[in-house]
Image (cartoon, rainbow, N blue to C red):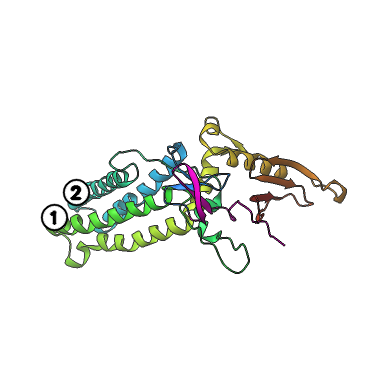
Amino acid sequence: MAVAVSSTCPGLYCGRTMINGSVDGDCGVCPRGERTNLQKVCERCTETPDLYDWLYLGFMAMLPLVLHWFFIEWYSGKKSSSALLQHVTAMLECSLSSVATLLLTDPVGLLSIRSCRVQMLSDWYTMLYNPSPDYINTLHCTQEAVYPLYTMVLIYYAFCLVLMMLLRPLLVKKIACGLGKSDRFKSVYAALYFFPILTVLQAVGGGLLFLNSWRTECLQDGELKDGWRDHLPQDFIIRLQLQTDVETSDRCSAADQINMKTLRSTNMCLHVNMQSEPQMKLQTTRSPSSSWFCLW
């Protein structure tokens, strides 16, 4: 008996590549700068970062500079004349690093970037969503679905660290004569500690920070603030409205536990059920022909 094989790739992020205008190859990871569409075909990301993407990148870029300034003031002393020059040098290091990162990000040589739109929290942690179609072998489809928000920050931190190691020790050695030899390089040593911490923060908590700060910045009394609706993914707006409906509803009896809303699209279904305790939970289930996102 023949077994029908689904033409749709399993999992959330596995897809087939497009070669010369036709879909070819087996299901697998998409190349960098691409992500799967609803038809599970790897599609090149051509969108420009929206306002909130730039705010996130700016926030992550400001963290090293603020920490530099803090530790320079902490270890320079109140009457040290070298603090101001070190502040300027730290700003120069971060500015050059940001420009170099923008120039090296696709499109190379331009101070503009293209990006993939963030749609859900799992986009930041694709390594946790590698499917096992036969429950034995794992199909590895780990990719940067939020390109370039994930790696761009890490590249920026690497540039900041290299420039600091090249410029700051020479500067401190020349101008920080009023400080003792043991205190002279403490601000540099501090950076060698907080850069790994920032790297782990971006690698592990980048998605949580992105979405949590989005809720703080864009929401007011459970509703989107004016001007933000046009800058955010439609999935965010849908899930926000559904969550608000559930959280503001009264308790339902067992007889009233019915489906409230069902949203259907080509490859996605959002189901919202009212439980006795109003709450929402995200669960991903496999389907041979589509991906389901169940909220209840």
Residue 67 position within the rendered picture, expressed as x and y whole percent measured from the top left: 33, 53
Q: Residue 85 carries which label?
A: 2
Residue at the image point whose x is 63% and y is 39% from the top: 238
Q: How crowded is mark 1: few (under 14 residues within 10 Å), some or many (20 or more)?
A: some
Residue at the image point whose x is 42% and y is 60% from the top: 200
User: Label 1 is placed on what type of residue?
Assistant: Ile
For marks 2 and 1, the one nearer the N-term is 2
**Front residue of this view, candidates 204 and 88:** 204
Q: Disc 2 to disc 1, how far (Cα)?
A: 9 Å
Residue 256 position within the rendered picture, expressed as x and y whole percent measured from the top left: 85, 46
* Residue at the front extreme, as displayed: 1
Q: Can residue 53 be seen in this view?
A: yes
* Residue at the bottom extreme, as displayed: 136
* Residue at the right extreme, as displayed: 255
Residue at the image point whose x is 70% and y is 45% from the top: 247
Residue 190 position within the rendered picture, expressed as x and y whole percent measured from the top left: 30, 62
Q: Is residue 249 visible?
A: no
Q: Residues within 10 Å of mark 2 (few under 14, many from 20)?
A: few
**Quadrant of the rendered image containing residue 189:** bottom left
In the rendered structure, are the residues bearing label 2 and label 1 in contact, judged by CB atoms less than 8 Å apart?
A: yes
Magenta residues?
Answer: 1-29
Residue 65 in the figure: left or right of residue 36: left
Q: Residue 24 carries which label?
A: none
Q: What element carries label 1?
A: helix
Residue 226 in the figure: left or right of residue 289: left
Residue 237 in the figure: left or right of residue 35: right
Q: What element carries label 2?
A: helix
Magenta stretch: residue 17 in it? yes
**Is 127 above or below relative to 81?**
below
Q: Which mark is residue 175?
A: 1
Magenta stretch: residue 167 in it? no
